[in-house]
Image (cartoon, grey):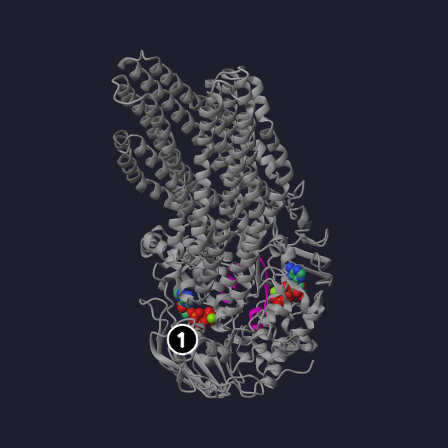
């Protein structure tokens, strides 16, 4: 779990919610016209609401108090009343629909932008942000933000307008009493300010613990197999209970505060009525005002607090929108560490095979790198890989081999030194070109739910079925794909769990091949393959390898024995280099690794 | 237990709380409807002209007191119901989590994390909203309705009340007709949301791949399609919801008109007084707000019922791997034998294991090699009952493992998976996963046995360093060694299973770990699956699987002599050219 301190830091780093909200309000701007229509419709609705009691007044004054009342006019007015009600409801209906439509459009836009932004961020971002949380950002935070527009804003317009109408009516009736009544407004402000901090804190607390709970659940769903095989269900469940309890407790506390807040306004409203009864009543007794005025004022005060109450109910919506806005803002404002060059080097594409016009020379110039400033992982790495050559990297685990490749593909940028392809700094390529030139196959294979073919072409429509199949054939995956029910159209379940690990690796290979890269990186990509399959694969690779630079990391030394050059890494440095023969003669690290890798060393030494 | 039952038993076990809460809201509404009455009387007194300052104060205090009673009673009831709703939310999440823990890998293969997560994230929240906010509003509306009815009947006229309420009585009809539609559409919305979460999850977890292939635009397009789908379905729901929310107040408007005309008629014929008529219209208009709310709340309940249905589907899945009714109890020693085991994965036809028979004596080491997809992992999965083997095929100390308690079986086995899943906790907690209470020394011992201690010590916070989601902060080999340590710390286990668990470590480290294994394994039965033959150098017996069948078996030397698959692999790895065998 993430510790609370870093959590707090992250929250602070997000900046204040107001600026985040402002950032998101931009999403509503295109709908300004729509919003105006909504406001107009709201006004229509409120006006019909105001007209209704007035019609009753007409019935009473004109039709019933007269000496010989008739039913006819009453029916007419009844009809009128019905028409007005229908108009009002229709306006309300249209308003509601339109507003929901706007809301949906806003969420859609935020979702798409957020997703685009997240995908553009560097790997460092993903090192520190849990997937579970990012999903909540995309799915529920966006929704909360849109509630700001659909619920909160609507309430502000509707209730604000009602309040203004009531206040206007009060002023018209008796400005002195009205002024007196308005004294309640500062009280409302003071109460809101008093509650504000508490409400905010408790809301934030709840949200934080909710994210933790969800993050925990997500992770445990992913690792359920391990939990079960290690028989730790009850421990993991206890931890879940703990997190769930903490969240629930926070949630109840938050609810308690919001109930208290709402009921305080309720109480204030009724207290105002009582005060009006008292002060107004005395005034009537002393003949300063008329009874009618008093009656009107007590009802107006009640009408005044109606919308105030519904506004305070919306306070929670405001809270959740604000905090969600902060979280989304926090992500959207995260700058990408990997910068696109302003004027990228333009690479031409070869006609015959669509490959980029590159020779494929890779050079590391005194590169140093660390994931955190305290600890360097790579130290002054300097080497050149000739175009079209096949080089191997070996070395102890954790030596920095994968890191090296991560730099070449720009998952991270170097701290010192530079990396060049054909003498051009990789930071001068557009990432698109760079990634078209380089393909990497990693030991960990990611698959998507979809068909085998879709996974191979990564859902790109421009890659034909034939190309997909050819790539699979070269990678030696064709055979088992055909054996699957449905063949290339077979559906891969969650993360390809219905395949063996080696089969997944073969798919990853085929995928890389169907992209037809200039430089191919294999990061222990054959570790889960048997040597026989691996040999077939390598034969396939050499067949199509003309013109391709290949960088291979392997622990199984037979994989790289044929390499033109082998680099041996240790603790972030290259300690030996040469081909197999030369390295064996040096009798250093490499020779030791080779000796240890013989299947029968033990027998030899025993 | 189905969620309906959960809800029922939850409500029953807390019936007194609910009763008190509902009662409190009822009382509150009773007080609330008194206020217009008091005000009316006050005005009458003032009109009559014999009000004194005293009387005025009295009425003011009366209003204040009634209002206070209303606020307190309502606040109390509201708080109770809200609290209960949140407790229900708690329990639903607990139930879901506990249920998931009983389901096997087979289930998790068919459902993505994003989809499942959406159930506890959104569906549970929707249910809670209905049960707290919705319930509050419904109770309030119903009581307000009842109280108003009571006041109109008592103080005005029974006939008038009944006639004008006829349109309002159509509301249940509308609910019955439109409700199921709303529910269905709402469910489709939730499904679309699940789809989006699912894609987001997959995509965020495959970030390196997506970056390395510059596939962001394609992913974005896939995402955008799902987002559009949500918008469409959401608008489909909104169309119905808004109609629904307009129809209810319309009915109450019609009620009002009926009351107006009929009431007017009654006044004309002197059946009721003008004052009663005025009061009646006031009461009727009091009903508009609750009815407006009612439409909203009914929608909320329909959504909740859709979500509950989704949860229902989830909870209805029966765990397929369970304890036997009468588990065998004995002192297990660790002999594993497999007799004529054939297996195919449920739902896919080809045979993955084909008449496999082998006995692994207690304390011995079995090595398994074989081509990719030949069934090695499957064999191990069956021994672990990750999938259920057919009856009478896999035996532990002569007992069919299906007759063993699941927890016994799994306590007996220490396992290192092929893909080494780690949790995002600290490295120490990961190693001590199966023994949370173990002393730090034991963690250190396991770490040093799997040659990861040095790495841990070089980390910023040592054993307490958090390793990120799925251990992202570690190198591939470090992850694998952490997974080995996690298995080795189970010192009481009788069986040790390594599924290609040294593939990502260099040969020097491999040699060291094998040396340690030789020492610690002692009485343990060990199964090592490997592609690199050097990992099998300590095996007492090696089998070669091909297309699910054992095609070769024996010791290293025997296998070499057979000149078959194994010998071929050996030649490739030992440095020569592959033979064409
Ligand atoms: N995302 C990360 N954040 C922080 N540290 C990391 C991260 N990834 C790797 N490291 C650390 O950097 C060092 C080098 O890791 P790298 O993955 O490059 O090793 P490797 O040579 O590929 O090892 P292996 O053979 O085990 O795959 C290790 O000590 C590892 O703990
Ligand atoms: N959950 C599953 N559902 C359906 N088929 C599966 C499932 N898991 C594996 N298979 C299939 O069963 C066969 C054997 O897979 P298994 O994982 O046992 O192979 P393996 O020998 O461990 O291979 P590797 O060396 O690549 O790890 C493969 O053809 C695979 O596609
Ligand atoms: Mg690596
Ligand atoms: Mg396997």
State which region is magenta: B515-536
Q: Tell which residue pokes out farthest to the front in this image.
A: A68
Q: Is residue A485 left or right of residue B63?
A: right
Q: Position of residue A144 (x, y in %)?
A: 44, 49
Question: How many residues crowd around disc 1 within 10 Å: few (fewer than 14), some, or many (20 or more)?
Answer: some
When the figure is inspected, residue B63 is found, relative to residue A586, above or below; the finding is: above
Q: Tell which residue pokes out farthest to the top in this image.
A: B50
Q: Quadrant of residue A354?
A: bottom right
Magenta span includes A176? no
Q: Is residue B418 left or right of residue B374?
A: left
When the figure is inspected, residue B561 is found, relative to residue B279, above or below; the finding is: below
- Using the image as rendered, state which of residue A121 and residue B237 is in the foreground: B237
Q: Position of residue A351 (x, y in %)?
A: 56, 87
When the figure is inspected, residue B124 is found, relative to residue B376, above or below; the finding is: above
- Using the image as rendered, state which of residue A475 and residue B213 is in the foreground: B213
Magenta span includes B529? yes
Q: Is residue A383 left or right of residue B152?
A: left
Chain hosting mark 1 = A
For the C terminus of chain B, which image quadrant? bottom right
Q: Is residue A107 left or right of residue A283?
A: right
Look at mark 1 in the image and give the residue it sits on.
A570
Q: Secondary structure at mark 1?
A: strand
For the N terminus of chain B, which image quadrant? top right
Q: Position of residue B173 (x, y in %)?
A: 63, 34
The answer to whether one can see residue A492 in this image is yes
Figure label count: 1
- Using the image as rendered, state which of residue B498 and residue B145 is in the foreground: B145
The residue sitting at 66% across, 51% down in the picture is B397
């Amino acid at each position: 779990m993430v510790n609370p301190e870093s959590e707090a830091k992250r929250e602070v780093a997000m900046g204040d919610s107001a600026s985040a909200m402002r950032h998101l309000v931009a999403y509503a701007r295109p709908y300004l016209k729509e919003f105006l229509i909504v406001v107009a419709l709201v006004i229509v609705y409120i006006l019909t609401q105001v007209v209704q009691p007035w019609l009753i007044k007409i019935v009473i004054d004109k039709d019933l108090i007269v000496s010989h009342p008739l039913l006819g006019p009453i029916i007419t007015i009844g009809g009128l009343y019905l028409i007005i009600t229908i108009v009002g409801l229709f306006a309300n209906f249209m308003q509601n629909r339109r507003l929901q439509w706007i809301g949906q459009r806003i969420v859609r836009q935020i979702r798409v932008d957020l997703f685009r932004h997240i995908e553009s961020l560097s790997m460092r971002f993903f090192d520190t942000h849990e997937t579970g949380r990012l999903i909540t950002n995309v799915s529920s935070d966006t929704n909360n933000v849109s509630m700001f527009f659909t619920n909160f804003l609507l309430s502000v317009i509707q209730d604000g307008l009602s309040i203004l109408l009531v206040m206007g009516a009060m002023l018209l009736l008796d400005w002195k009493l009205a002024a007196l009544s308005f004294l309640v407004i500062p009280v409302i402000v003071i109460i809101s300010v008093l509650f504000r901090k508490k409400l905010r804190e408790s809301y934030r607390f709840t949200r934080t613990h909710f994210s933790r709970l969800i993050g925990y659940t997500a992770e445990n769903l992913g690792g359920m197999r391990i939990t079960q095989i290690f028989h730790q269900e009850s421990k993991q469940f206890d931890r879940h209970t703990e997190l769930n309890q903490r969240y629930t407790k926070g949630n109840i506390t938050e609810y308690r505060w919001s109930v208290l807040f709402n009921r305080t306004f309720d109480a204030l409203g009724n207290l105002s009525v009582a005060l009006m009864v008292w002060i107004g009543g005395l005034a009537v007794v002393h003949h300063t005002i008329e009874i009618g005025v008093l009656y009107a004022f007590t009802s107006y005060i009640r009408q005044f607090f109606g919308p105030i109450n519904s506004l305070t109910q919306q306070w929670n919506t405001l809270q959740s929108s604000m905090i969600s806005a902060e979280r989304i803002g926090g992500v959207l404002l995260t700058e990408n560490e990997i910068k696109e060059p302003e004027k990228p080097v333009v690479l031409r594409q070869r006609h015959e095979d669509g490959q980029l016009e590159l020779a494929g020379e890779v050079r590391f110039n005194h590169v140093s790198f660390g994931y955190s400033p305290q600890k360097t992982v790579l130290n002054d790495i300097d080497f050149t890989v000739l175009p079209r050559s096949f080089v191997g990297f070996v070395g102890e685990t954790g030596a920095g081999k994968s890191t090296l490749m991560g730099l070449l593909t720009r998952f991270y940028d170097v701290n010192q030194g530079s990396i060049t392809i054909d003498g051009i700094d990789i930071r001068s390529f557009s990432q698109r070109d760079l990634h078209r030139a380089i393909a990497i196959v990693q030991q960990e294979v990611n698959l998507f739910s979809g068909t085998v073919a879709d996974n191979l072409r990564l859902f790109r429509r421009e890659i034909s079925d034939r190309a997909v199949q050819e790539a699979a054939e070269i990678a030696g995956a064709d055979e088992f794909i055909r054996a699957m029910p449905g063949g290339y159209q077979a559906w891969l379940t969650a993360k390809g769990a219905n395949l063996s690990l080696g089969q997944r690796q073969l798919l990853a290979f085929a995928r890389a091949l169907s992209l037809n890269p200039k430089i191919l990186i294999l990061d222990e990509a054959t570790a889960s393959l048997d040597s026989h399959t691996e040999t077939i694969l390598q034969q396939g690779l050499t067949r199509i390898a003309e013109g391709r630079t290949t960088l291979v990391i392997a622990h199984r030394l037979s994989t790289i024995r044929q390499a033109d050059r082998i680099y041996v890494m240790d603790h972030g440095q290259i300690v030996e280099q040469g081909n197999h023969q030369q390295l064996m003669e040096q009798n250093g690290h490499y020779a030791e690794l080779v000796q240890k890798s013989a299947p029968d060393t033990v027998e030899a030494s025993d | 237990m189905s969620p309906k039952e959960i809800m029922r038993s939850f409500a029953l076990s807390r019936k007194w709380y609910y009763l008190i809460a509902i009662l409190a809201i009822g009382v509150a509404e009773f007080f609330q409807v008194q206020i217009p009455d008091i005000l009316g009387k006050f005005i009458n007194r003032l009109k009559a002209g014999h009000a004194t300052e005293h009387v005025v104060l009295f009425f003011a205090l009366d209003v204040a007191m009634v209002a206070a009673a209303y606020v307190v009673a309502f606040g109390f009831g509201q708080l109770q119901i809200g609290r209960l709703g949140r407790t229900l939310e708690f329990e639903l999440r607990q139930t879901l989590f506990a249920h998931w823990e009983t389901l096997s890998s087979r289930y998790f293969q068919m459902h993505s994390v994003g989809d499942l997560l959406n159930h506890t994230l959104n569906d549970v929240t929707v249910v809670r909203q209905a049960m707290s906010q919705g319930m509050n509003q419904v109770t309030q509306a119903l009581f307000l309705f009842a109280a108003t009815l009571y006041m109109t009947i008592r103080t005005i006229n029974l006939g008038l009340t009944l006639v004008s309420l006829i349109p309002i009585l159509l509301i249940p009809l509308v609910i019955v007709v439109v409700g199921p539609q709303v529910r269905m559409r709402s469910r489709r919305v939730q499904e679309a949301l699940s789809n989006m979460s699912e894609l987001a999850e997959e995509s965020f977890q495959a970030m390196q791949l997506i970056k390395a292939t510059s596939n962001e635009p394609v992913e974005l397009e896939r995402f955008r399609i799902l987002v559009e789908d949500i918008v469409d379905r959401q608008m489909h729901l909104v169309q119905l919801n808004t109609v629904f929310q307009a129809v209810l107040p319309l009915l109450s408007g019609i009620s009002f008109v009926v009351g107006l005309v009929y009431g007017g008629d009654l006044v004309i014929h002197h059946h009721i007084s003008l004052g009663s008529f005025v009061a009646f219209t006031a009461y009727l208009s009091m009903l508009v707000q609750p009815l407006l709310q009612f439409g909203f709340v009914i929608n909320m309940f329909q959504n909740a019922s859709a979500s509950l249905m989704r949860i229902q589907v989830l909870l209805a899945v029966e765990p397929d791997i369970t304890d036997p009714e009468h588990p065998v109890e004995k002192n297990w020693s660790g002999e594993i034998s497999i007799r004529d085991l054939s297996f195919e994965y449920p739902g896919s036809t080809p045979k993955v294991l084909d008449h496999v028979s082998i006995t692994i004596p207690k304390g011995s080491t079995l090595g398994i090699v074989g081509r990719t997809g030949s069934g090695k992992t499957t064999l191990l999965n069956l021994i672990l009952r990750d999938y259920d083997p057919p009856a009478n095929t896999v035996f532990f100390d002569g007992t069919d493992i299906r007759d063993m308690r699941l927890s016994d079986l799994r306590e007996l086995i220490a396992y290192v998976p092929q893909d080494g899943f780690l949790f995002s906790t600290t490295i120490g907690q990961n190693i001590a996963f199966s023994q949370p209470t173990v002393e730090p020394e034991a963690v250190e011992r396991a770490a040093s046995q799997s040659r990861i201690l040095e790495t841990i010590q070089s980390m910023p916070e040592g054993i307490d360093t958090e390793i990120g989601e799925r251990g992202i902060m570690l190198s591939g080999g470090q992850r694998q060694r952490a997974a080995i340590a996690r298995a080795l710390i189970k010192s009481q286990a009788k069986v040790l299973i390594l599924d290609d668990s040294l593939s990502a470590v260099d040969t020097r480290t491999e040699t060291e770990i094998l040396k340690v294994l030789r020492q610690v394994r002692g009485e343990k039965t060990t199964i090592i699956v490997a592609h690199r033959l050097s990992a099998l150098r300590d095996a007492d017996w090696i089998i070669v699987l091909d297309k699910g069948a054992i095609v070769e078996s024996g010791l290293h030397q025997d296998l070499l002599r057979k000149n078959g698959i194994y010998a071929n692999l050996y030649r490739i790895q030992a440095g020569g050219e592959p033979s064409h065998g």
